[in-house]
Image (cartoon, coloured by chain):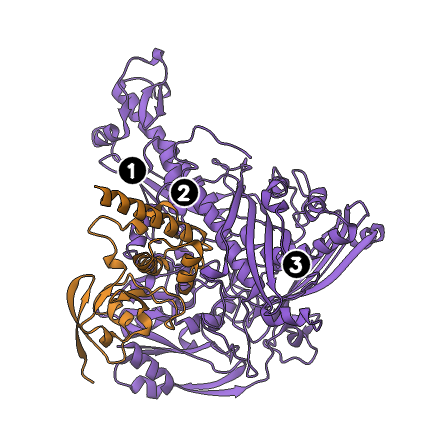
Chain colours: A purple, B orange
């Protein structure tokens, strides 16, 4: 493990700048926001999984006293299906149809109209008065049904192999010659797996408040993973120029990828424009479950071949991922990440994007990667068993390292995967004794990580403190890490640094909080801004001392003569220089905008112990250790928190979480009672072991940490259950009825 | 329909408000009373983000009618700190990073406070079962459980010290 010495704040468990507001209930989330004259928006949603909309009559709703505006797809900018308009990774053709059904309603819960009224109750009543003439169509929910030759086609314009199809896309990565590779294999394991869609499950439902003035000047307060994304998508869908929209990021109550697109903001904007009143919209939990997220369900087949000594010679994967009603499942994550932890000469990995009559999927923590890793890491476990090898040894023998050409393309620079395997192997957990019906499993995972656009502004206040403004919503403690970095560079106490999230009018463009990119990117722009400020401070001191700026150094929060040759001067502190600013050149501040590069992939290796109640089929995770190469932990507590949170989500995905559909094609468990996320008593303490292999391309060695922790979990749990029972599961979730079936020999 | 008038005590202060008969306590807190610390995550009593106490009993304010607070004592997250002095649980949650997005935090704190009031010496299992009604999707609960156990230990220590003085 890398120990970084002599840091005062980087690596310290400081108190987050936004903490006191959050523990006192004062922090402002989107649903907490109000405005004078505000009215309420509500959405009418399709009851059908698939129906052509022949007409909508809103007259009765509009006539209801208290109703101020009604909008339908007619009010939203149309993006014809024949031309793609990309905004980041989102295609506006699909966004405009997801926000509100156009030609057809494509899933139960699909918005068909929206109403704004003086109360929520009146808005809801008005929704019931809207008459929609539906032509109900046949539908499909599951992948197997959607890819049948005679399946009901969702979109005639989507063609696969020349014919209208529900397969909306195909992606392939290739390395070497997989057929030749398998010829060299002495042991081959091939298995098929299925997973169910799972929801990101943030506790805060989507919410926004929008005010549109008569001259189109628009202000949006909303919960999202990116205020600039909100501005751009709302502009595209409402027709209001981006320069007229100011998107203000409220505190965000969780997202995990699910708040990287808009659902409410364009509708609230159109309602506000039409009514002339500020409009607030808040989803119910049921609306969240029926019409936002989740991530894909999947079916996949993975085949891996090895020599008897454990050398893997070939690997092949086929991944079908559900997109929901509109194209765009995360096949890139499944296809690209699954084999990347390993140095395999021959790889073929293919993914298919399948539409069906479910809500459109959204990103969820390392989108696609957990689905792929579940299949690959379970097959590796079987391969280790067949080869009579320790599963961590098998991974060590084939581990990707510096210089390995990854299956998804790049040649890895210095990475820390081997270190995670070694740390897992050396951890006391790995050799601790197990009891009856208990088992242990391991699995590894990889996520690309990302850089991209980021902006920061750092200003010195007149009293010599610091205000940092960045453009990324703080979803899990990034403000704390930024305060540590800025304080470290300036040599001042971290409590003198205030970190704010700017709105779209006050800070330069910054891309989404997502992809495990925020600290990587924001640390870079904050570092460069702070370095500019330090240069200014040295110049100011040099001017006061009448010496060359090169002869001034910045240390411990003050300017000092660089050497005895420079002269004898008392240090000038940040506060003293700030006080002299009006006479010495004016305000001290610096901003930097960058397209950050150099994000390196992240790796983790997990150990999971389970105990199975063979009477009830209940699986309990009794011990869990997650080891991860985190690059450098700027704030260790929040790095651990990301790891523990990802593991908890993975345990839910592995054991209980799933969308259950009824015979009418409708989700039957759209609430927290029946959609069973892990509660406190379901989990043990979660040991987070940070391995620090600094990223050489980052000033502080940062690597993204938020997504890797979810990637290996489902396989680690599945492998542990196999170890406990001697039986394998090839589908998630491994819920009590399924466990009982397998125990009774029916599975 | 005319609104109903309710007189109650919130965080030690006498309060009056008007509400519809069907309004929940959470509606009243977040609406006319402007106490938005209690959050709505599900409106079905499954997430605990709206936890408050009613005469010292922990309840989900989304499952209680606003009119039921008439003549009773309500405590919300806004009443946990004393002036600018944070409750030991609030302080420990900050030190232990027992929050990430923070949306479940008010409910977690109110529930944890209710636990420590009735059981100052909880085991890890006690904490886990008591907080099983408060969903957190960010932290994996590890740091929350640690923060509650450590606060309990410190409050006991503090109590012992005070009783010796």
| Residue A263, position as x, y percentages in the image | 43, 68
Relative to residue A352, is residue A60 drawn left or right? left
Query: As displayed, is residue A598 above or below residue A49?
Result: above
Disc sitting over residue A496 in the figure? 1
* Mark 1 crowd level (few <14, some 14–19, many ≥20, 10 Å Cα): some
Q: Chain of mark 1?
A: A
> Which quadrant of the figure contains the C terminus of chain A?
bottom right
Give SS at disc 2: helix
Is tag 2's residue or tag 1's residue first in the polypeptide sequence? 2
Q: Residues within 10 Å of mark 3 (few under 14, many from 20)?
A: many
**Secondary structure beneath label 3:** helix
Is residue A122 depicted above or below A549 in this figure? below
Q: Residue A211: percent from the left, percent from the top?
A: 29, 66
Quarter holding residue B139: bottom left
The answer to whether tags 1 and 3 share a subunit is yes
Instruction: Characterize the local packing of mark 2: few (<14), some (14-19) or many (20 or more) Cα atoms within 10 angstroms.
Output: many
- Asked whether the residues under the numbered discs 1 and 3 touch, taking CB atoms below 8 Å apart as contact, a structural biologist would say no
Q: Position of residue A568 (x, y in %)?
A: 29, 13
The CA distance from mark 2 to mark 1 is 14 Å
Residue A383: image location, x then y, percent: 75, 53
Answer left or right for B156 relative to A421. left
Above or below, A708 against A589 in this view is below
SS state under label 1:
helix
Question: Residue beneath label 3, please?
Answer: A724
- Comparing A283 with A565, the one in front is A283
Q: Nearer the viewer, residue A58 or B112?
A: B112
Label 3 to label 2: alpha-carbon separation: 40 Å
């Amino acid at each position: 493990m890398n120990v970084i010495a002599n840091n005062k704040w980087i690596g310290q468990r400081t108190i987050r700048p936004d903490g006191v507001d959050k523990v006192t209930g004062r922090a402002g989330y989107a649903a907490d926001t109000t405005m004078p004259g505000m009215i309420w928006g509500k959405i009418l949603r399709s009851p059908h999984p698939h129906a052509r909309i022949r007409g909508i009559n809103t007259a009765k709703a509009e006539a209801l006293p208290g109703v101020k505006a009604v909008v339908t797809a007619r009010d939203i900018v149309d993006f014809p299906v024949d031309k793609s308009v990309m905004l980041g990774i989102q295609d506006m053709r699909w966004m405009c149809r997801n926000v509100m059904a156009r030609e057809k309603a494509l899933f139960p819960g699909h918005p068909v109209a929206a109403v704004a009224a003086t109360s929520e109750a009146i808005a809801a009543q008005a929704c019931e008065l809207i008459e929609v003439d539906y032509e109900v169509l046949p539908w499909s929910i599951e992948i197997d049904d959607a890819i049948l030759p005679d399946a009901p086609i969702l979109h005639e314009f989507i063609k696969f192999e020349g014919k209208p199809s529900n397969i909306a896309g195909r992606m392939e990565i290739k390395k070497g010659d997989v057929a030749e590779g398998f010829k060299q294999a002495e042991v081959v394991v091939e298995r098929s797996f299925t997973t169910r869609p799972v929801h990101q499950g943030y506790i805060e439902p989507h919410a926004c408040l929008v005010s549109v003035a008569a001259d189109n000047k628009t202000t949006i307060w909303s919960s999202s993973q990116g205020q600039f994304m909100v501005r751009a998508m709302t502009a595209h869908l409402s027709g209001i120029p981006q320069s007229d929209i100011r998107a203000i990021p409220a505190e965000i109550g969780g997202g995990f990828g699910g708040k990287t697109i808009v659902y409410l903001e364009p509708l609230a904007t159109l309602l506000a424009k039409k009514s002339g009143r500020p409009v607030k919209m808040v989803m119910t939990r049921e609306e969240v479950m029926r019409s936002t997220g989740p991530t894909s369900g999947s079916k996949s087949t993975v085949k891996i071949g090895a020599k008897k000594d454990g050398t893997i010679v070939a690997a092949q994967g086929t991944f079908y991922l559900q997109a929901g009603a509109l194209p765009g499942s995360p096949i890139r994550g499944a296809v690209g990440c699954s084999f990347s932890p390993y140095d395999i000469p021959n790889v073929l990995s293919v993914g298919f994007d399948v539409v069906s009559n479910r809500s459109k999927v959204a990103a969820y923590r390392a989108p696609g990667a957990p689905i792929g890793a579940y299949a690959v890491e379970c097959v590796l476990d079987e391969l280790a068993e067949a080869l009579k090898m320790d599963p961590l040894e098998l991974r060590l023998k084939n581990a990707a390292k510096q210089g390995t050409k990854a299956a998804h393309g790049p040649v890895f620079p210095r990475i820390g995967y081997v270190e995670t395997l070694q740390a897992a192997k050396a951890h006391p957990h790995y050799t601790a004794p197990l009891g009856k019906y208990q088992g242990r499993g391991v699995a590894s995972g990889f996520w690309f990580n990302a850089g991209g656009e980021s902006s920061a502004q750092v200003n010195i206040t007149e009293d010599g403190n610091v205000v940092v403004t960045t453009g990324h919503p703080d979803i899990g403690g990034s403000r704390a890490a930024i305060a540590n970095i800025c304080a470290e560079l300036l040599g001042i106490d971290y409590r003198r640094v205030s970190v704010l999230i700017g709105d779209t009018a006050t800070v330069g463009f910054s891309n989404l909080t997502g992809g495990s990119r925020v600290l990587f990117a924001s640390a870079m722009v904050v570092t460069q801004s702070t370095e500019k400020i330090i240069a200014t401070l040295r110049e100011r001191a040099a001017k006061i001392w009448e010496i060359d700026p090169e002869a001034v150094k910045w240390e411990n929060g003050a300017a000092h003569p660089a050497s005895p040759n420079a002269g004898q001067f008392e240090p000038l502190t940040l506060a003293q220089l700030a006080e002299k600013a009006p006479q010495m050149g004016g305000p001290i501040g610096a901003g930097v905008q960058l397209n950050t590069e150099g994000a390196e992939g992240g790796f983790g290796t997990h150990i999971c112990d389970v105990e199975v109640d063979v009477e009830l089929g209940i699986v309990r995770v009794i011990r869990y250790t997650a080891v991860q190469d985190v690059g450098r932990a700027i704030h260790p507590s929040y790095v651990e928190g990301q790891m523990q949170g990802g593991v908890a989500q993975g345990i839910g995905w592995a054991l209980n979480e799933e969308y259950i559909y009824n015979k009418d094609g409708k989700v039957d468990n759209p609430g927290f009672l029946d959609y069973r996320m892990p509660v406190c008593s379901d989990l043990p303490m979660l040991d987070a072991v940070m391995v620090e292999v600094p990223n050489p391309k980052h000033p502080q060695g940062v690597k993204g940490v938020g997504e890797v922790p979810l990637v290996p979990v489902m396989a680690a749990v599945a492998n542990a259950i196999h170890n406990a029972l001697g039986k394998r599961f090839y589908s998630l979730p491994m819920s009590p009825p399924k466990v009982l079936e397998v125990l009774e020999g029916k599975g | 329909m005319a609104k109903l008038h309710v007189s109650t005590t919130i965080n030690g202060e006498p309060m009056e408000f008007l509400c519809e008969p069907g309004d929940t306590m959470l509606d009243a807190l977040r609406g006319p009373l402007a106490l938005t610390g209690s959050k709505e995550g599900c409106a079905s009593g499954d997430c605990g983000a709206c936890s408050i106490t009613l005469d010292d009993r922990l309840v989900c304010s989304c499952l209680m009618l606003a009119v039921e607070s008439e003549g009773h004592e309500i405590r919300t997250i806004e009443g946990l700190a004393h002036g600018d002095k944070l409750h030991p649980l609030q302080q420990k949650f900050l030190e232990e990073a027992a929050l990430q997005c923070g949306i479940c935090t008010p409910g977690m704190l109110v529930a944890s406070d209710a636990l420590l009031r009735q059981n100052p010496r909880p085991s890890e299992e006690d904490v886990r079962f008591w907080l099983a009604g408060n969903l957190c999707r960010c932290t994996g609960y590890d740091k929350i459980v640690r923060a509650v156990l450590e606060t309990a230990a410190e409050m006991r220590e503090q109590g012992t010290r005070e009783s010796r003085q």
